[in-house]
Amino acid sequence: MTAYQHIGVKPITGAMGAEVFDVDLSADLDAVTFVEIKRAFHSHLVLIFRDQKLTDQQQYDFSARFGPIIPHPYVKGLPDIPEIFKIIREPGESYSWDSFYHSDLMFLERPPLGATLYAKELPPYGADTAFTNLYLAYETLSDGMKSLLTGLEAVNESGDPQQYSNRYQSMDELAKNDAMGATHPVVRVNPDTGRKALFVSLAFTTRFVGMTEQESLPLLKYLYEHSTQAHLGCRLSWQPGSMAMWDNRVCLHHGVSDYFGEVAKHRRVMQRATIQGEIPIAAAAAEPKVA
């Protein structure tokens, strides 16, 4: 707590995540407070702010301090702020928006830097969100595996665009857009920290460049299982008024699909603003050359 002068920061686990206290995100944050929030963001990768009372515009304004806000390519946004959209699960719906650990929109040429997610309506318990740290996923690999992955690229694909909205009663498709895909390095460097992280997920990554899907699958499955080990992550328990944000470049996340019993009887509405990212930088390209 003593490392910050204007906010309180309490880590969630040893691997990642922190609760941030003593800050009202609806206010016009001064530059010094915002710098401390950014420092906590880069240190902990996932932040959650409790007891916030935000308008749609205030969520947008806070998120936009980290970069331009982009719309989802397949889901209709809010009428007045189309860049922000709601993820809605009605009572009785059991399909999960994000049952696989993933990094959002990996199939874009410029995958998001991050996102904010604001809890609008919740079950009384359950429906948490779990995260995992892709810095640690890379750093805990053997030297041999790191060598194998250096320079390797992977193809990431959106799959059927209708899956993002048409399976939900209260979510609408943005347009009849085609499926999308992009090729990214398997090991990327976060330009804000200089640290290396894995960048693959079975949710979107279909194969390695130069290999078939069948040839790629064993290694992709290993990397996914390695990356999603419990000790590399954290889990957020939601409360009304909670807003989380995460570094999408170096985290995987998924909504815990525990829609049973009392949890399944309640509506869950989360509101997301997505922050534009940069073209991923391959680890080898980012390292200084030795004369």
Image (cartoon, rainbow, N blue to C red):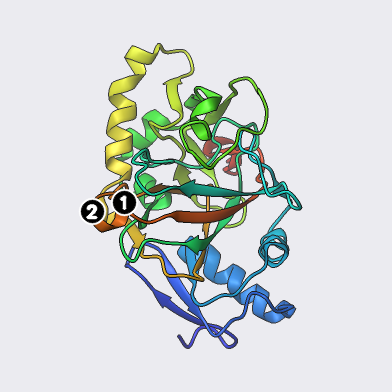
Whether residue 144 is visible here, answered yes or no, is: no
Instruction: Tell me the amino acid under the disc marked 2.
Output: Gly
Graded by Cα atoms within 10 Å as few (under 14), some (14 to 19) or many (20 or more), the crowding at tag 1 reads many
Residue at position x 51%, y 57% in the image? 246
Q: Pick the residue in front: 188 or 276.
A: 276
- Residue 289 appears left or right of 80: left
Residue type beneath disc 1: Ala
Which image quarter holds the C terminus? top right
Residue 139, position in %: x, y?
36, 49
Q: 10 Å neighbourhood of mark 2: few (<14), some, or many (≥20)?
A: few
Residue 5 point in image, percent of width and height: 58, 88
Q: Residue at 68% x, 49% y: name it.
A: 78
Callouts 2 and 1 close, C-beta under 8 Å = yes
Please name the residue that numbered disc 2 is placed on.
Answer: 261
Viewer-closest of 167 and 83: 167
Q: Quadrant of the N terminus?
A: bottom left
Q: Secondary structure at mark 1?
A: helix
According to the image, label 1 marks what residue?
Answer: 264
Q: Quadrant of residue 14?
A: bottom left
Q: Position of residue 193 (x, y in %)?
A: 56, 57
